[in-house]
Image (tube, helix red, strand yellow):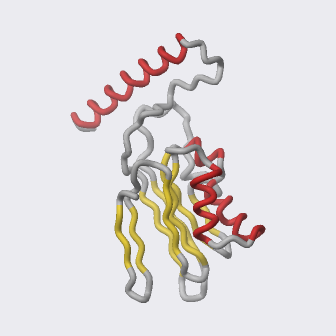
């Protein structure tokens, strides 16, 4: 624990309390979840990696820094295979963002299912999930296919990302 992390926790708790009280005053109903911050700033806490070997075997790994002030007992998308971390014979996917949205959209598995059952390319499947299957402002994905195609898409302010292939092509970016 550092002074900076304690200050961040206090700031988030103060904002969440104010957001929750405002929502409750508007009587938005039982769906009000005071543990979420709609205006949470972009932050890079997740580290994901997707790889394909020369035989076409895909693998994904995802690690998260978690959420500041998370609810006790909250389980995010990272440990749920099919949500924030997924691979099959066609692709590997790693997600970052708001875990609840990624879980609801089963983001990783949905990319693989769109490829398998709809015949979509990796890029088309990743874009479909990011644009239409999860809430706006919640999700970023990196993915690789068994043929070596890679895709990186997000519907947030930014996403730290990089990719490289055996031909020497590389890409490093944060913003759109």
| Residue 132: image location, x then y, percent | 63, 51
Q: Residue furthest top?
A: 25
Q: Residue furthest left?
A: 3
| Residue 54: image location, x then y, percent | 55, 88
| Residue 69: image location, x then y, percent | 42, 32
Q: Nearer the viewer, residue 151 or 60?
A: 151
Q: Residue at x 52, y 74 (%)?
A: 150
Q: 57 above or below 12?
A: below
Q: Residue furthest right?
A: 117
Q: Residue at x 54, y 81 (%)?
A: 148
Q: 98 above or below 150?
A: above
Q: 163 above or below 46?
A: below
Q: Residue at x 51, y 31 (%)?
A: 72
Number of numbered callouts drawn = 0
| Residue 125: image location, x then y, percent | 64, 65
Image quadrant for the N terminus? Answer: top left
Residue 81 seen from this side: no
Answer left or right for 2 relative to 172.
left
Q: 118 above or below 40?
A: below
Residue 102 seen from this side: yes
Please identify the quarter of the rendering in which residue 30 is found.
top right
Q: Residue at x 50, y 31 (%)?
A: 36
Image quadrant for the C terminus? Answer: bottom left
């Amino acid at each position: 624990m550092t002074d900076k992390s304690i200050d961040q926790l206090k700031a988030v708790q103060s904002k969440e309390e104010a957001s929750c009280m405002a929502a409750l005053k508007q009587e938005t109903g039982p769906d009000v979840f005071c543990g979420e911050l709609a205006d949470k700033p972009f932050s890079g806490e997740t580290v994901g990696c997707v790889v394909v070997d020369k035989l076409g075997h895909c693998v994904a790994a995802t690690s998260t820094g978690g959420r500041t002030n998370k609810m006790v007992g909250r389980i995010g998308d990272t440990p749920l295979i099919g949500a924030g971390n997924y691979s099959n014979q066609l692709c590997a996917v790693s997600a970052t963002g708001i875990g609840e949205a990624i879980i609801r959209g089963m983001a990783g598995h949905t990319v693989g299912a769109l490829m398998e059952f709809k015949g979509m390319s990796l890029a088309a499947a990743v874009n479909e999930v990011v644009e239409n299957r999860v809430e706006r402002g919640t999700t970023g994905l990196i993915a690789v296919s068994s043929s070596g195609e890679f895709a990186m898409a997000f519907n947030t302010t930014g996403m730290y990302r990089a990719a490289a292939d055996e031909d020497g092509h590389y890409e490093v970016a944060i913003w759109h």
